[in-house]
Image: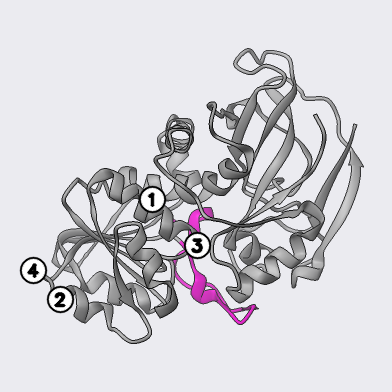
Amino acid sequence: MRSRHLSVTRIGGPETLQARTENIGEPGPGEALVRIEAAGVSFGDILIRLGVIPGSPKPPFTPGFDFAGEVVKTGPGVTSLTAGQPVAALVRTGGYSDHLIVPAQRLVPRPAGAGAVESAAAALNYFIAYQMLHRVAEVAPGQRILVHGASGGVGVAFLQLAQLAGIEVYGSASAEKLDLVRKFGGHPIDYRNEDFVQVIRGLPGGSVFAAFDAIGGPHFNKSSSVLERGGILVAYGQSAALVNGQAKKAVGARGFLGGIVLPKLVPNGKRSTFYNAWSLEKSHPHAYREDLAAVLNLLAQGKISPIVAKTVPLEEAPDAQRQLERGAVGGKIVLTTGVPR
């Protein structure tokens, strides 16, 4: 069987993504061959392509963390999956493909009602937001949190999941996207015209239990300053490492690809941590499948609704990344393969 994929041929811009068609082998023991229907385009794809994140794969490699599709064939010893079964997965690399062989344990069944495009749009963003809310910060109903970039993909996931859990959210966004924060139950903060520290300190109690910060650098210190005693700052990205499409040296958080999971104490009994899905999975082996299944079930039940900015053919991934770099889209860009069953 032949498989199409987009390969990062060297560290650099979107033009380094090149289409390739290669033979794909048979799934081995414990593996499954998947026909990918839809794959998400994420900010992490860009940072890895630019070589910003320490420990990133070296070219050539196929990017793509999240995909949805169906099982084509299983290897020896795989009894949990069958051919034709709809699945979704998070992987370290390989999502920008139309067929992929992966360990069967990475594949989580998609329930009826969880379509491929919607699942690809939800898999990464809602999974990491779910884990940060419920496994890392362990936010309880009625507590208050601060989310930076609340109108972005992960930010909207935070808003929707927090609303389901009865958690109060203050979310920063640009002026033109404040209504989106309100739409999903958050209290918007215009980050260009308002100082979030002053906004939070002006509230009853003057603090939040948890702050979720994807910006990085000196911004972490400001976020930490609004935590209540015993509160937690969770860093999960490094968007400050990219300015106008140009890479800067990543400092501090290494996103969900690297860093630490266990909270560290900072002054006044506050805690801070860098979220890392891979380390969390290592320390809690069942967390990956349980949490991705929880997200897919919420999607199938209509309790979450990822914003799909657009769907584009797999070969247009370079342009999709350009648009994401420029901030020219509101929502998740999803690549579709168009491969017939």
- Residue tagged 3: 254
If you read the primary sequence from the N terminus, does the residue marked by circle 1 or circle 3 appear first?
Answer: 3
Q: Is residue 311 above or below residue 174?
A: above
The residue segment tinted magenta is 237-259
Q: Write down the quadrant of residue 135 in the picture.
A: top left
Of all residues, the one furthest to the left in this rendering is: 204
Q: Write down the quadrant of residue 235 in the picture.
A: bottom left
If you read the primary sequence from the N terminus, does the residue marked by circle 1 or circle 2 appear first?
Answer: 2
Between circles 1 and 2, the one closer to the viewer is 2
Tell whether label 3 touches label 1 (CB within 8 Å): no
* Residue 300 placement, left or right of 202: right
Spatial distance from mark 3 to mark 2, Cα to Cα?
A: 29 Å
Q: Residue at 91%, 42% (x, y): give it.
A: 22
Name the amino acid type tagged 1. Val
Residue 204's mark?
Answer: 4
User: SS of the residue at dot 4?
Assistant: loop
Spatial distance from mark 4 to mark 2, Cα to Cα?
A: 8 Å
Disc 4 crowd, CA 10 A, few/some/many (<14, 14-19, 20+): few
If you read the primary sequence from the N terminus, does the residue marked by circle 3 or circle 4 appear first?
Answer: 4
Between circles 3 and 2, the one closer to the viewer is 2
Q: Position of residue 188 (x, y in %)?
A: 30, 70
Residue 201's mark?
Answer: 2
Q: Position of residue 218 (x, y in %)?
A: 37, 79
Q: Is residue 108 above or below residue 190?
A: above
Disc 3 crowd, CA 10 A, few/some/many (<14, 14-19, 20+): many
Q: Position of residue 285 (x, y in %)?
A: 45, 31
Name the amino acid type tagged 2. Arg
Q: Residue at 42%, 76% (x, y): give it.
A: 217
Asked whether 178 or 246 is in front, the reply is 178
Between circles 4 and 1, the one closer to the viewer is 4
If you read the primary sequence from the N terminus, does the residue marked by circle 4 or circle 1 appear first?
Answer: 4
Spatial distance from mark 4 to mark 1, Cα to Cα?
A: 30 Å
